[in-house]
Amino acid sequence: MSDSQRQSDTIDENERRHELGSYLWGYGLALALTLVPFALVAWSGWPRVTLLWAIGGFALVQVVVHFRFFLHISLARQKREDLHLILFSTLILVLMVGGTLWIIFNLYGRMVPELLP
Amino acid sequence: MTLNHFLDLALGRLDWHALPFWEMIEQPTLSHIVNGSIVTAAASLVVLGALATVVLITRFGKWRVLWSDWLTSVDHKRIGIMFIVVALVMLARAIIEAVFMRAQQAVGLDGGFLSAEHFGEFFTTHGTIMVFFMAMPFLTGVINYVMPLQIGARDLSFPVMNSVSLGLTAAGAALIMVSLVLTPFSTGGWSGYPPFTEASFNPGAGVDYWIWAVTLSSLGSTMTGINFAVTIYKERAPGMHLFRMPLFCWTALCTSILMIFAMPPLTVATAMLALDRYLDFHFFTQDLGGDMMNYVNLFWLFGHPEVYILILPAFGVFSEVFSTFSGKRLYGYKGLVIATMCIAVLSFTVWLHHFFTMGQSPSINAAFGIATMLIGVPTGVKIYDWMLTMYRGRVRLTIPMVYALGFLILFVLGGMTGILLANPSIDYQVHNTLFLVAHFHNMLVPGLLFGMLAGYQMWFPKAFGFRLETRWGYRAAYAWIAGFILAFFPLYALGLLGMPRRAVGFIEPAYLPWTIIAGIGALVVLFALFSLVMQFWLSLRHRHENRVPVGDPWDGRSLEWATPAPVPEYNFPVTPEVSSRDAFMREKDLGQAYQRPAEYRDITMPANSALGPILTVTGFLMAFGLVWYLWWLVLLAGVASVGALIARSFVRRTTKVISAEEVRETHEAWLRQVDETQAVKRDKEQDTSNRGRPAAPVSGAVQ
Amino acid sequence: MTATPSRHPGLNLGRAHQEAHDACEVLVFGFWVFMMSDLIIFGLLFANYVTQLDALAGGPGPGELFEMKSAFLETLLLLTSSFTYGLASYCLKYRHGRGWLTAWLGVTLLLGLAFIGFELHDFHKMAGEGGVPSRSGFLSAFFALVPLHGLHVASACLWMVVLMVQMCVHGLDTGVKTGLVRLGLLWHFLDIVWVGIFSLVYLGGLA
Ligand code: HEM
Ligand SMILES: [Cu+2]
């Protein structure tokens, strides 16, 4: 028991540093990815559509950062049921949300144009 | 505080008008008396039934057994059985309602005996019950019972959550039952479309009953889905790779994935409708920016995957039935698995076909129409695989097989009409007519009910240790098929003639012959239900002649047949090791079945928990309070629910140990019994000589 | 259990916590599945919000009701709490003692409560300006989406308190450890949902 314990302690040491680094990186990146879009909206004066694209882009990257650094989900690893699960959920989410927007806005266009953005 | 004030607080909006006979006392017109009497009779049945149950349990002194062996049990087998009991009770009610509707329409030319309001309640409760409180509990129960056994597990991953799922479903069912006594129920159909179900059109308690019953059921089903999926991923016996699982487990997996992702839209839809009704939100109202089309979209985001939730497990059952009773391994196993997965994913891409007529552009309709037709492809693959499973097999026409064959033919016909409906321009003609009603019953009755009944016939001996009686069993099976055909094929004609669905009466004489035939069909269905009751009763009486203690009455192929009947709590004395598909059949072929394990170990099992029954009660009370505006009750029950959950999280002794000694004794006794039992050939399998030990098949038979 | 134990490689406790690590295998996977189901709920409410953006019915809209400053503050609070929860998990995994663990959990809890406080304050202010859910389809959609997230945060706070009490009663046993791992998942997940909310609802509304 103590033998294997010692062995795993050395592995743990690496992992430990790695993990702490992961949280710090995550926090730093997420902060940056939050500050920039807020700053853009507050001061940039860009046209609305450009702003929206930028906000969306930063949000997407930030979501990935959270998954990667806080939830420790990465693409490269052996058998990852949770990764498959997340990807499948994303697929379903895209189908449901995308389909909903497509259908409802098409409907607005034909029936209640004043609700179109 | 005056007395009135106090009563208002205490009773919310409950008053005399909630009693089913009140209206006919206040205004004794003929219509009120007829309708009032029907509801009163139903309400009395509910009350007397409940009383009789209580009296019987007390008389036989079974409260303790009920509590410790059933209600607080977290054994997947017992929970499965309780799910099925709920389903059968609700099935009986929904069938009787269907007969009333068919009777009404059979005499519905220029009138009939039911009021429009009452007819509305009938189709709403019938549809809601059939989908949420018959079909869902039935399939959940069957999966609960069979799936862990088939993958060689001891229980589900989260046994207590399983009991909570059952509790929430039962609470929802109880709510619908209570709505017979404290009326009314919703008249908004099983789909509950606003704005009709909004407070401005329907301020009464009816829609609220519907909302909370459905919400309870959808929460329970979400948890069930999570539980099943995790179990299949994590609890498989060594060697049971995914591609060695019996097909039933695959369908269970796909169904649970659908539950996980398709119940949320329903929860969202009903919760939003509730917010509209209770807190004056404007999601689906006609004024202030509300948009009912959002509801339709949300509801069918759930609704379409739901029909596959209902049908896939039945596909699984039929796969087992066809291969078991053809004495052959399943033809095209991989194809069936892939087809099942395709269906599961595709089912998220077609929901719009339920509202082709809402007003979106033809290109969207075309896209969803094509996606819908695509689902026909994997389904067709399945049909051929099943037929080829029978091809050159030694087909035995047992009761499950009768259901399966009926399904095969009828389901193809129903599928054809589905392909017709997938064409938007045809749908424009027949939507909202009885053609649609005929179509979906044509899918659901053979594709769900027959499947579940076949499963019930096949696994009953596994669960209770004796076979079901066959004479009434065959009668029931043939009556279901004949009754279904008589009751629903005329509806295709009626739909094409233009008769709308959900219509209490009509003025077109051309409908009459068809509605009469359909009414006769409903009576045949009623006879089928009666036959099932008779079958159960006779089986119970003659259970000693029909015992199958060895546990393999049908020469089964998968692991559940390797256990005694009834199955001991721990399922397997030692976890089985699997080396191929059709694991148990392979053991039998190699002569390695019924082996003595090298060593017995203590078995750790989850301990009983009262959380399930507690949440059943608090969940029911919360919903009941919400329906009748009894805010104090909502608060109390809500606090109690959260308290119970927290208290449960403090419990640390969540397991119990069954000693190796006890396991050894039980298992050795059974093995001795196996040795003493005469093996029977397949032609004797419905005979009293069948004790659950099959003789090896004739050599040369196709395997 | 499966023959080849596939240890959960994401958020985990590590080999040093043998029993709890094993127990996590199933519990964490189950919790992931639950969260993905929950994600669908949020996704649909987001979609609904987008379809109702112009359903103002003459009532106040994002420009009048939202305030960048408080949205920014709330974002910082929640993000920081996600980080401090990470530190708590880190202390738990590498056995830095109950003291540190409790301290980081406490900080996280306070940040979470502060977030809820600010949010309630926001809602209150919106109501003062006529921004109540019964006013329009748009406001209904807003009040379905954002408070639902807040409700999740509040439940997570309650869960944290319960786990801290359990830690006092039972010590840092398997039950508490697995609870903390799952709560961690939930906490990070709620921050991800909030990224969607501040981007789409607040920044999108103010852009
Ligand atoms: C086998 C005997 C059955 C009979 C005789 C029967 C009869 C009926 C009738 C008469 C209606 C009303 C049609 C109308 O709108 O005019 C109906 C509606 C419906 N039935 Fe059945 N049914 C049966 C089984 C089932 C089963 C097994 C299911 C589902 C699992 C089911 C689900 C529904 C649903 C969802 C509706 C629609 C309710 C609504 O309009 O909101 N039925 N059925
Ligand atoms: Cu559909």
Image (tube, helix red, strand yellow):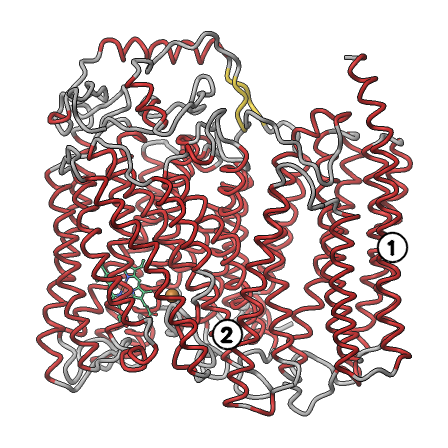
Q: Quadrant of residue A18?
A: top right
Report the side of B617 relative to B20 (left or right). Answer: right
Host chain of mark 1: C
Judge whether residue A11 can be spotted in this image. Answer: yes
Q: Position of residue B296 (x, y in %)?
A: 47, 74
Asked which secondary structure carries label 1, the reply is helix
Host chain of mark 2: B
- Where the C terminus of chain B falls, by quadrant? top left
Residue highlighted by disc 2:
B295
C181 over B466 or under it: above or below: below
Amino acid carrying label 1: it is Thr
B184 over B286 or under it: above or below: above
Q: Position of residue B447 (x, y in %)?
A: 28, 53
Give ligand 1's quarter of the image: bottom left
Question: Are dots 2 and 1 in contact, CB under 8 Å?
Answer: no
Residue highlighted by disc 1:
C80
Amino acid carrying label 2: it is Tyr
Is ligand 1 closer than 8 angstroms to the Cβ of mark 2?
A: no
Disc 1 crowd, CA 10 A, few/some/many (<14, 14-19, 20+):
many
Residue at x 60%, y 88% (from the top left corner) = A115
Q: Quadrant of residue B344?
A: bottom left
Asked which secondary structure carries label 2, the reply is helix
Judge whether residue B38 can be spotted in this image. Answer: no
